[in-house]
Amino acid sequence: MRFVIQRVSEASVKIDGAIYSHIQKGFLVLVGVEEADTKEDVDWLCQKLIGMRIFSDADDKLNLSLQDINGDVLLVSQFTLFASTKKGNRPSFIKSAKPDIAIPLYEYCIQQLSQLLHKPIKTGQFGADMKVSLVNDGPVTILMDSKNRE
């Protein structure tokens, strides 16, 4: 499973021209699920996400977590995070999980983050044509992969 974490001052998702979800300060997280992912991958990524200290403290050092600032999360599924560009110019998405695997893990991720943060998690809509807008604060963007735990 992969997370692309963007520290934002605001972010939103529109579906069919209408705002579906919106957050202020926090994380916009793009989530990619691959066939081999399990709940263990979700658990590890969620724990890392909420503890990630990438918000500025009073001394302007990246020292505060999402919990410390009571920030929000906008979680958006994105199967293209597992695109393979090895051959040719048309990406292959063969490693991306099919909906019967991806949807339950995405929903489990929403549930876990909500429990860990003690607040609702804003989302996109799985499989929808979404228009995602954000103001990347910094900019700060972090990539995490549960299979490559660096």
Image (cartoon, rainbow, N blue to C red):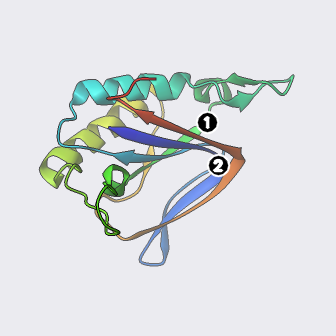
Picture layout, residue 34 above or below residue 117: below
85 and 28: which is toward the camera: 85
Callout 2 crowding tier (Cα within 10 Å): few <14, some 14–19, many ≥20: some
The answer to whether mark 1 and mark 2 are in CB contact below 8 A is no
User: In percent of the image, x 31 and y 55: which residue is there?
Assistant: 86
Callout 1 crowding tier (Cα within 10 Å): few <14, some 14–19, many ≥20: many
Residue most extreme to the left: 100
User: In percent of the image, x 85 and y 24: which residue is there?
Assistant: 58
Picture layout, residue 12 above or below residue 4: below
143 and 71: which is toward the camera: 143
Picture layout, residue 93 above or below residue 46: below
**What's the residue type where badge 1 is placed?**
Gly
The answer to which quarter of the image holds residue 12 is bottom right
**Residue of label 2:** 24
Disc 1, SS: loop
Answer with left or right where residue 30 lies relative to residue 101: right
Answer with left or right where residue 150 lies relative to residue 148: right
Gap between marks 1 and 2, in whole Å? 8 Å
Mark closer to the chain start, 1 or 2: 2
Answer with left or right where residue 135 lies relative to residue 143: right
**Residue of label 1:** 71
Q: Position of residue 131 (x, y in %)?
A: 48, 69
